[in-house]
Image (spheres, rainbow, N blue to C red):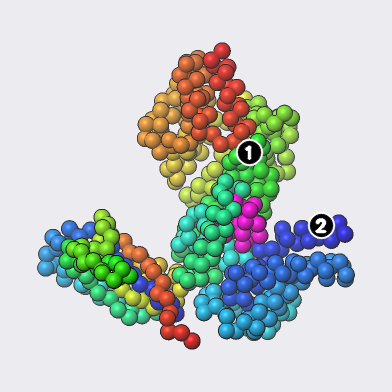
Amino acid sequence: MAQYMYLIFGDESEMANATQEDWALMMKAHSEFAEQVTKLGGTISHGEALAPSPTATTVRGQSTGSPSVTDGPFAETKEALGGFYVIDAKDLDQAIAFAKLLPTSGGVEIRPVIDTSGG
Amino acid sequence: MSRLADALDDAYRREWAFVLAATVRVAGSLDVAEECVQDAFVAAIGAWSERGVPDNPGAWLTTTARRRALDQLRRDRTLRSKLPLLIEPDANEPDPADLLEDSVVTDDRLRLVFTCCHPALSAETQAALTLRLVCGLSTPRIARAFLVSEATMAARITRGKKKIEVARIPFAIPAESELPERLDTVLTVIHLFFTAGHTASSGDELVDAEVVGRSMDLARLLHQLLPYESEVQGLLALLLLTDVRSQTRVDSNGSLVLLKDQNRSRWDGAQINEGRSLVALALTRRPPGRFALQAAIAAVHAGAPLYEETDWAELLGLYDVLLTVWPSPVVALNRAVVVAELRGPEEGLAIVDAIDAVGQLDRYAYLPATRADLLRRLNRRSEAARSYEQAIELVDNDVERVFLQDRLAEVRG
């Protein structure tokens, strides 16, 4: 088993204009996604939706001794990071199969998680 | 000694992929497997010169390479990669110890091909890894074929292998549902490599025969492994029927000879026949795939005893279907040439201008070259000259450049 982080990117205006009903539908879609992943042999170890990028704060320059604190996300992108999952999958093919099932109108970046447990 | 050298060359070209793929299963790493296979070829020099070339050189090399991989794994237990390649278990392979028996040799070449051509790798990396790992071509040779520096190519190959390891790209044949798409990627890689050799991207020779030969080997290998896949039949047919013209595309002075002026009696009839029977098979799939259709187009050209006898109506029909399954501006440009033959240069030119207006082929030398030729035929000389100038600026191959310069002088004169 290998672990992957799914970084879900999308158009934030869609989220901003979402009605309560839209939210409910999205939550339902994500629980269905979780069920499918489990059924296909994957394990979701964590996943969250994130507040929109204007609420982000970036701290840089840790190595300089006087880190700066600025308003906004680390990288300005047209499609913003909106949520994430950490999922255990058999291999990249299975990880990609899960990504194809993800309910998102944007896209998802899959990154392998490095095993730092040693041994 | 030369018999030994021949045997080694032959084994390298024929057996490399088989030996490497079989060693990956033991080594659990592409890098380690590659190293062990190289060692096995070195060991073969000594062993074969002393005891003669074995009956089955591939099996000898596989056993030697696998033994080395096992030794290395035992020795370097602590250094052993924490991320062994994810190898699909094989039903025929009960015990790793049996792997050293000559009789138990699993053909893992298809897994190797699909791993190298995984869609999570960039198109450039897929090509580089396929040539390095499946064909066993050296990094400098691959760099030359794709016109990049050796350092760039070496870095690309290293990054690719690293991604396979870290992102856990499996050493596996894709699931049935994924196969058509994954296979298309593999075929695209082979076709790209063939094209790079058929019209060398640089230099004073039009055709890079080694690159053409290796890409044909790859297509044959894939056809041997997947004999019933229509698009594999189509690709092999396309390469056979295109390559048949390689020898007649330049004259004895090394100058370009156009299709209409080529000496067709020098085309290899056996190769054309093989290509045509593959086309017939490939076209039985409905709807036909893009490689089958391209091969059918090449078959029409190869089947005409004289340029004047080319069946342009049949070609136009094939291009129309090809354009629906594969809407590419390059296909549209080739179709325009057929339209010009069938209905006159004026109609062809209108299509070329429409393609030009979209702007997708701004860096494609064959667009202004086609336009120039149509204008020349319409006797619109000053416009033709301008298009020849544009084409000359974009063309990479010297033989093609000289041809275009001659035509430019002709329309100016």
Question: From the viewer's perspective, is A25 left or right of B209?
Answer: left
Residue, disc 1: B203
**Residue B323 at what x, y percent from top left?**
45, 41
Q: Residue furthest left?
A: A20
Residue sitting at x 73%, y 79%: B101
**Residue B259 at what x, y percent from top left?**
62, 30
Q: SS at mark 1?
A: loop
Predominant secondary structure in magenta?
helix
Which quadrant of the rendered structure holds the N terminus of chain B?
bottom right
Which quadrant of the rendered structure holds the C terminus of chain B?
top right
Q: Nearer the viewer, mark 2 or mark 1?
A: 1
**Residue B239 at what x, y percent from top left?**
62, 46
Q: What's the chain of the residue with tag 1?
A: B
Q: SS at mark 2?
A: helix
What is the number of the mark on residue B6? 2
Q: CA distance from mark 2 to mark 1?
A: 29 Å
| Residue B275 in view here | no
